[in-house]
Amino acid sequence: MDMSSGLIAGSQHRNELVVIRLNNAESNYAQQQQQLKVRRQICQICSDEVGFTLDGEPFVACDECGFPICRTCYDYERQDGTQLCPQCKTRFKRLKGCTRVEGDEEEDDIDDLDNEFNFAGQQNGIPPHPILQRELAQVPLRTNGQMMDADTPPEQHALVPSIMEPTSAGDGERKIHGLPFLDPKLHEQTRSLDPSKDLAAYGYGSIAWKERMQNWKQKQENLLIVKSESGDKDWDNNGDLDLLLMDEARQPLSRKVPIPSSQINPYRMIIVIRLVVVGFFFQYRLTHPVKDAYALWLVSVICEIWFAVSWILDQFPKWLPVDRQTYLDRLSVRYEKEGQSSQLSPVDIFVSTVDPLKEPPLVTANTILSILAVDYPADKVSCYVSDDGAAMLTFEALSETSEFAKKWVPFCKKFSIEPRAPEWYFAQKIDYLKDKVLPSFVRGRREMKRQYEEFKVWMNALIAKAQKVPEEGWTMQDGTPWPGNNVRDHPGMIQVFFGQSGGRDMDGNELPQLVYVSREKRPGFNHHKKAGAMNALVRVSAVLTNATYLLNLDCDHYINNSKALKEAMCFMMDPQLGKRVCYVQFPQRFDGIDKNDRYANRNTVFFDINMKGLDGIQGPIYVGTGCVFRRQALYGYDAPKKNKSSTRTYNCLPKWCCCGCCCVGKKKKMKKIRKAKSEMKQKNSQKDDIGANVHAVDDTKDSIEGIRDENLAIMSENKLEKKFGQSPVFVASTFLENGGTVKGVIASLLKEAIHVISCCYEDKTEWGTEVGWIYGSVTEDILTGFKMHCHGWRSIYCVPARPAFKGSAPINLSDRLQQVLQWALGSIEIFLSRHCPLWYGYGGGLKWLERMSYINATVYPLTSIPLLVYCTLPAVCLLTGKFITPELSNVASLWFLSLFICIFATGILEMRWSGVGIDEWWRNEQFWVIGGVSAHLFAVFQGLLKVLAGVDTYFTVTSKAGDDEEFSELYAFKWTTLLIPPTSLLIINLIGIVAGISNAINNGYDSWGPLLGKIFFAFCVIVHLYPFLKGLLGRHNRTPTIIIVWSIMLASIFSLVWMRIDPFLSKPNSPVLEECGLDCNSL
């Protein structure tokens, strides 16, 4: 069964497996591609075709690993080389038709008397090694390949390093070949120098020798520059460090760039000063209550204490911000050597989608096209698309996208365009002719834009057709019913578009693998939404490709920087840093946002300030998309321990103290060391054995069981099944730290892939609790990253000059609040679960500042309650004539003024070292209040109902049509109950200001002084809610009817209250006269 033979649908629970074939043309094409791939099997030494044996079978030099080597290289390695397979280091066996060499053993299964005694060099002259043949064509010889005798003048000798071989023309004649730089393992014929000849014949003074000398001198000059810049610090006199710096491939792939001290030190100083001022502020507030408004004073103090705690949780994780710099050129030097296959690690990319009507297929198609065109070796990239809605529209759109990719990918790589999502590339308002003077580019761009417009028309036709579902459901091209017609009850489906059978573009170049996956869904099972879909992709990819690293993207986040994967590899593949990195998180950047960013959709304060601060501690939190993972970290393994030098610990102590410390507990330490070494040996032995080549799934299972019986002392078979599930292929793949799949029959692998996405596979396993994406919260991203950090891993925050990924954000007010509601609800779920950072993960590898950031990420919705109360206090104070503070003295005024100055100074210094603009900072402050009194408040109550009572509450959003102008969605109004609290706050504060001014006019001049503080308090609330007010009013003052009705209702209620208070009636201060009870007239 070929991987591209059709859609594979099945259910392990029901023991079903169905193959829906493609049409004949596609099947024939797949067969042709498979045959072509066999014919094109390339020798890994000389890059020539491997070829076939006399029997018509593919030539296999090594029976152990099947490493592709042609017959010529095989003969050369056996006769003049190391006689070992380059991959598995197994000695080559003599094959039929080959001459016997020294060391060959008697083999009964080879009957080849004709070549039995044809030792090397005795018959059929050995041709030059293919590397020599290739280098001869590249290096010009002054002799032009002519025969030369020993009497040739020295000035006519070849000016290249040479070797001389006897020819059939005579003993005195020699033929000169250029000697390339061969592998030191290869055998070279040595000879002594002839003093009668010029040294040029031996390579000295030749062109190649001069080039090497120039390169060496250039490296020496660079070395001197590096030494002068570093001030000759930490240089070893013996020259070992000089050689290390000379070697570009050994230098680090990235470096940490600390914030300049002139920017970070004042920032830290103002934080400390602010902390001291806050202490004196609360000392005054607690010791000076307001006796005639004790309730208002107490409520305000409680709110202010919570705000102070929230500020501390948010501020101190930003104490050590850092930037990072990557070196892509060093990555290429180390892992992409010229003339050799790329050594970069493979990457599996996950794209998740659910509803094609809410997530347009054209948007998903652009994301996939940007992935297939990424600047990374095509054989190292695999794209997995998760269709959790089992929609045939998504499947058909993906099929069309795969066809268009054959045209789009070569265009991108040929002209190195950015970005490589066609929708956004053609939408750029730039002069595309700038620096592109090639006529072929102009013609190619016009042709590609025309083809993309046709592709869009076809995609829109698919969407229009999908609006009306047939009564009998969808059917495929061959008449087979679509397996996903019932969204909640369907088998698992897998379709490999570009797979092992080969997928090539129009130029004949290989394309990355593209796989469609829809996991099985059955009634009665909890499928865990996006987290469950991502875990299914982890298992499928482990069975089919098992790349070392994973990248997950939302369907609306395309690759904006084609070198994004290489940026991540600069951290992941760094020999010093990479082993302890669990993931590399990129910031989220967005397209299609209005210039003013009214609702803080860009969220630059979080991504450019908070995340950089966390990067200096243990790493940023995982934000759900644009993140490159280490697969082993997702499997719940602990981070590797750091090797600490014992000499550095004891050097600072006296010798007698060092000896005493060494003697104390020596036996216990030795026992622990021996136990750790034995466990490590057993674990390594287990991984090596399980990583052996297996030729079928059944053989894999038997092999694994045999290995476990012998070596599995750490983890028994039952523990493995409880942790990873009952799939021997997947369990075997989890021990391959460097990636690579367990070799097996393709049909068996596809059956195993269907097995691992079945709805019951995760039952009684640790999936979702310790392995993979963690369940239990809507925001599974925060929870998953938190668990990794608890295991001792660290993460990296990568901010390249060109944004790595870009996506779309909801610019409408109601949609934005719904998004914030979902995030806040997930945080409340984590706070009320066993994974709450307040009490989970102690004793692990989580640092205390990192824990503080996670506590802040889970408790911030609770701030909505004191925030709502505090925003209501100005109106209450204006209506009642009371205030939350007594009359301020000079010292109290100083503390209040100092607090306001520290608040603004902290923000200004943050903007200084982070580069965030003041408009972005102010928009973030405004939306913190808007979201706090609306979405966060509802998330608290909804989270309590969901966790404590098991009640799911949903808020219905009804939309109102917008116009067709630019950013029309920004002005579209959708009523939702989330709008009630901020609308009420606006109205009551406006009414409070009117009431306060009216009261001051009525009571005279003395009442204006206290009124100014109250009006300033209310004015601050209204200014923070101004973007919300602007969104309510709509465009061109077309205020929605619901807002008018709500305003009239609230105004009526407060009018009735106002009449009851009757502030315009003067309050007499004279004594009240009462009747004494005597009738004065009668006297």
Image (cartoon, rainbow, N blue to C red):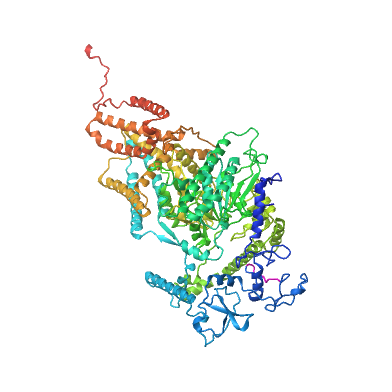
Q: In the image, is residue 538 part of the stretch drawn in magenta?
A: no
Give above or below for 798 relative to 876: below
Q: x, y (%) of residue 1003?
A: 25, 30
- How many numbered tags mark residues here? 0
**Can the viewer see residue 28?**
yes
Q: In the image, is residue 90 part of the stretch drawn in magenta?
A: yes
Give above or below for 276 relative to 192: above
Q: x, y (%) of residue 210?
A: 46, 76
Choose between 570 and 216: the one closer to the eye.
Answer: 216
Q: Name the residue at 49% across, 82% down.
A: 155
Instruction: Please identify the residue farthest to the top as the structure is shown.
Output: 1082
Choose between 108 and 790: the one closer to the eye.
Answer: 108
User: Which secondary structure class fits the magenta region best?
Assistant: loop
Give the quadrant of the C terminus.
Answer: top left
Q: Is residue 1032 left or right of residue 388?
A: left
Q: Name the residue at 58% across, 66% down.
A: 672
Q: Name the residue at 32% across, 43% down.
A: 288
Occupied quadrant, residue 114: bottom right
**Can the viewer see residue 829?**
no
Give above or below for 1005 relative to 614: above
Q: x, y (%) of residue 458?
A: 55, 41
Residue extent of the magenta highlight: 87-93
Q: x, y (%) of residue 488?
A: 62, 39
Occupied quadrant, residue 881: top left
Instruction: Please identify the residue farthest to the bottom as the structure is shown.
Output: 196
